[in-house]
């Protein structure tokens, strides 16, 4: 991977092979604030809310304090809350424990970033000014199937089961293991507008060119197999 990678070409190449309900989101974890990029101004209720803004076409970066409204997202992104906000993590977890959403013993198993980012860059994939650490695809299961098969052909499939709540743990899990399929969680669906019939496929940015190449082979193979299966169903199904 080099700085010459054309992310817009990659987005268009992938979009020509699979149906994308919204633009893929590029996320980059940085050691310092980027130059020439707009700093986020305002508030959002969660870290995944920034995915919604990027999918809608905005390119910007956040600082750690922009994530303080989301105790769970701050945890998965290894962002320590300010002392006056630290109690919110315990309050949020207590609520989740009390209503049976998560068990206390599950918390240590939730993937986290290895270190706290100084800034986080968000953008639509094609507009990314830097190599993304991860790229999020919000897709229907049929498109997730094709993308997942492409990661396998490209040799970057993690071989892990689909993840659930919290959705944001898919980002550190992807960075550590490779492509991750996420079924999403209720908070993410509310904050991002993810549909009932949509899910996520998350891949590392550095792997995207070979995934895009593999996707061309996979979509062609699936088209041929669809015709094959359709013929067999017509000839062999008796009910």
Image: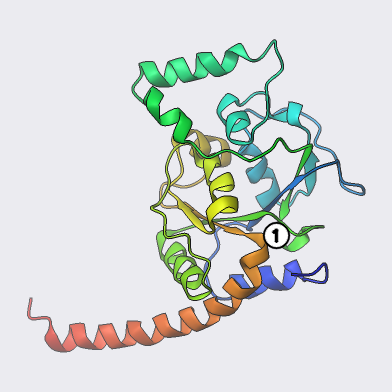
Residue highlighted by disc 1: 125
Residue 68: percent from left, percent from top: 68, 24
Q: In this rendering, would 75 be left or right of 223?
A: right
Q: In this rendering, would 239 be left or right of 48?
A: left
Residue sitting at x 75%, y 26%: 65
Q: Where 79 sits versus 215, above or below?
A: above
Q: Where 238 sits versus 1, above or below?
A: below
Q: Where 167 sits versus 219, above or below?
A: above
Residue sitting at x 47%, y 59%: 158
Q: Who is closer to the viewer here, 161 or 146?
A: 161
Residue sitting at x 64%, y 40%: 114
Among the 4 quarters of the image, the one containing residue 84: top right
Residue 145: percent from left, percent from top: 42, 66
Q: In this rendering, would 134 be left or right of 32?
A: left
User: Split into 4 quadrants, where in the image is the N terminus?
Assistant: bottom right
Residue 6: percent from left, percent from top: 77, 71
Q: Secondary structure at mark 1?
A: helix
């Amino acid at each position: 991977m080099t700085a010459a990678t054309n992310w817009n070409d990659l987005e268009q190449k992938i979009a020509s092979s699979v149906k994308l309900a919204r633009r893929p989101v590029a996320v980059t974890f940085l050691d310092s604030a980027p130059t020439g990029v707009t700093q986020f101004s305002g508030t959002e209720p969660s870290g995944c809310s920034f995915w919604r803004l990027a999918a809608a076409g905005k390119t910007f970066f956040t600082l750690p304090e922009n994530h303080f409204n989301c105790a769970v997202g701050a945890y998965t992104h290894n962002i320590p809350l300010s002392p006056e906000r630290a109690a919110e993590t315990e309050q949020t977890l207590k609520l989740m424990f009390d209503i049976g959403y998560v068990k206390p013993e599950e918390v240590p198993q939730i993937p986290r970033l290895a270190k706290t980012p100084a800034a986080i860059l968000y953008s639509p994939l094609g507009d990314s000014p830097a190599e993304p650490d991860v790229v999020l695809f919000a897709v229907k299961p049929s498109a997730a199937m094709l993308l997942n098969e492409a990661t396998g052909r490209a040799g970057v499939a993690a071989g892990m089961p689909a993840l659930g709540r919290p959705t944001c743990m898919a980002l550190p899990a992807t960075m550590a293991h490779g492509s991750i399929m996420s079924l999403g969680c209720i908070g993410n669906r509310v904050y991002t507008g993810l549909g009932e019939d949509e899910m996520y496929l998350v891949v590392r940015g550095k792997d995207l060119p070979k995934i895009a190449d593999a996707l061309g082979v996979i979509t062609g193979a699936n088209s041929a197999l669809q015709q094959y299966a359709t013929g067999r169903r017509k000839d062999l199904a008796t009910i």
